[in-house]
Image (tube, rainbow, N blue to C red):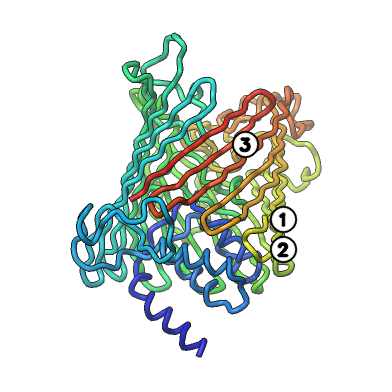
Amino acid sequence: MKQYIKISIVYILCPFLFAQKIPVSPDHNVYPYLYRQSTNGILPQWIQSVRPLTIDQVLSLLNKVKENDEINNNTRILAEQFISEFISPKISGINLPFSKKNKLNHLLSYNINDVEPHFLSIKNDSSSIWIDWSEDLVMSTSNDYHTYFQDNISLKTIISKQISAYTQFSMNRLVWKNNGKIIESVLPPDSIDWYNYNNEWAKYFPEVKSIFWYNSQAGISIDFDKLNFNLGRQNHSWGWSTNSSPILSGDGMPFSYIGLQINFGKIRFRSLHGSLMPYSPYEMHKRVYSPSKYIAAHRGEIDITNNFTISITELAIYGNRNIDLDYLNPAHWYWAVEHNTGDRDNLLIGIDYSWRIRPNMRFYQTMLLDEITWSKLFKPWWGNKFVFQSGLHFILSSNPSVPDIRIEYTLSRPWVYSHKDSINAFSSANISLGHPFGPSSDLISISTNFFPSSKIFIKGSFDYYRKGTGLGSSINQSYIERDPVLDNDTPLLLKPINYNRIITLLIDYKLSRYIDVQCGFNSRSKDDRQIRFGISWEW
């Protein structure tokens, strides 16, 4: 009987799984939930190695959790709740705002049986299109900023069983208490310290005492069974760390790219070729000419067993020339290309693995090699440029109301990610594409996530890091400028050294399908503390 129920669920959901290669925001609460199920052994490990996942992947994974007979009731309720949130519109025809089929119901109460609301939706046969509108308001205790607004509109469409697309635009407004200070009209990026500002072009309007900046993402995906092509603009996170992967961390502004994914079950391959920003938008606006800059990356994963996955990644940054067809070919080995074309590009290789030691405990490690000489491997030679990361994810209980624990240690050598030509630094808009703290640093991070109820999500973290500030501690510094006196004696941390700790806490309460309430706390070093209260409206 249970088998027939499972088949029925798959049959009912199949129409909503077709072509939904639309990415799910990396900040969504569904990721910590899925990662718990992966570490517990219910879901495969690969879901933790790349972000973002797509809607069809998330729905498939959630249904696999729901079909498991051994999960507890809290886990099942959360799976059902997330499923109802991601299913595409089911009501045929045109559903306009405030129409009979699209009324604002249960504004202040949450019911798992409610249909996920959309501002506008159109469904016809196998095609559908829907528009979502959201507004965010954040009140902060910061000395400089006290109010933040974000207006967001997104359009998603399933064109056919093989083709899907989306686009998203956000306008950000940050009220700045300038206390009578004279402020530039267009602001340099280091003058803005806000949690979701990533060096975008920002302009100050004195009439409303506010800074404005904008974000956009978009993509179109074509799916052929085991092969997927996509063209888009988004961030990418590759590696087992949720926030600080040495390979691609997902930080910074989204960049435009073309991508390919191939899935043969236990063997997976993905590649991308993207266009990066050589400088921040603030600098770009001041230049008459800006050089080109590109990233090429591909990653192969293989499941040696269900509990052991190993991966290898090649990345190349190049610029000051047209697109190189050698890097555009996803099957080409970048190592050979870079050496045979004059060693002029920034080539990095990542090797990583994840080992689920037992259900509820997963251990992972990553070694990113920028440059290395084996004869000097254990010596403090300046050219030993690498990042090493170890992490442990431990699930104390299968009940999602009990916190999980993640512990990570990351060591990053001086000059890693940098290059003799600063255009080829491993960055976009002056923000690192890899480990967020960059060269000459080490980091110990402890974090936790849990769901006290189906409406509440809580996450917290404690980071302690040391960061060198001497020459060689920035990805944007050319290693030609290094001090030759230190060539054979380059320490991990280049003096002077900064010692810092970061404490974060976020509580998210889902009041209804439309309204979320958040309370956040952020403490950086000794004197910088910030409490944020936010409310989000989404339709």
Viewer-proximal residue among 249 and 360:
360
Query: Which residue is the site of mark 2?
Result: 361
Q: Nearer the viewer, mark 3 or mark 1?
A: 1
Instruction: Identify the element where label 3 is drawn.
Output: loop
Q: Real-space Cα distance between discs 3 and 1? A: 22 Å
Residue located 57% across and 35% down the image: 419
Q: Residue furthest bottom?
A: 1
Residue located 30% across and 64% down the image: 89
Among the two numbered marks 1 and 2 on one chain, the one whose residue lies closer to the N terminus: 2
Residue 171 % position (x, y) = 34, 36
Among the two numbered marks 3 and 1 on one chain, the one whose residue lies closer to the N terminus: 1
Q: Label 2 sits on what residue type?
A: Met
Residue located 42% across and 13% down the image: 183
Crowding around mark 3 (Cα neighbors within 10 Å: few <14, some 14 to 19, many 20+) is many
Q: Is residue 60 left or right of residue 378?
A: left
Instruction: Identify the element where label 2 is drawn.
Output: strand
Give the number of the disc on residue 392.
1
Q: Real-space Cα distance between discs 1 and 2? A: 7 Å
Crowding around mark 2 (Cα neighbors within 10 Å: few <14, some 14 to 19, many 20+) is many
Which corner quadrant of the image does residue 99 belong to? Answer: bottom left
Q: Real-space Cα distance between discs 2 and 3? A: 28 Å
Q: In this view, does 184 lie to the left or right of 2?
A: left
Crowding around mark 1 (Cα neighbors within 10 Å: few <14, some 14 to 19, many 20+) is some
Q: Label 3 sits on what residue type?
A: Gly
Which corner quadrant of the image does residue 491 belong to? Answer: top right
Circles 1 and 2, Cβ within 8 Å, touching? The answer is: yes
Residue located 40% across and 15% down the image: 184
Q: Label 1 sits on what residue type?
A: Leu
Viewer-proximal residue among 188 and 153:
153
Query: Which residue is the site of mark 3?
Result: 438
Residue 49 % position (x, y) = 57, 58
Instruction: Identify the element where label 1 is drawn.
Output: strand
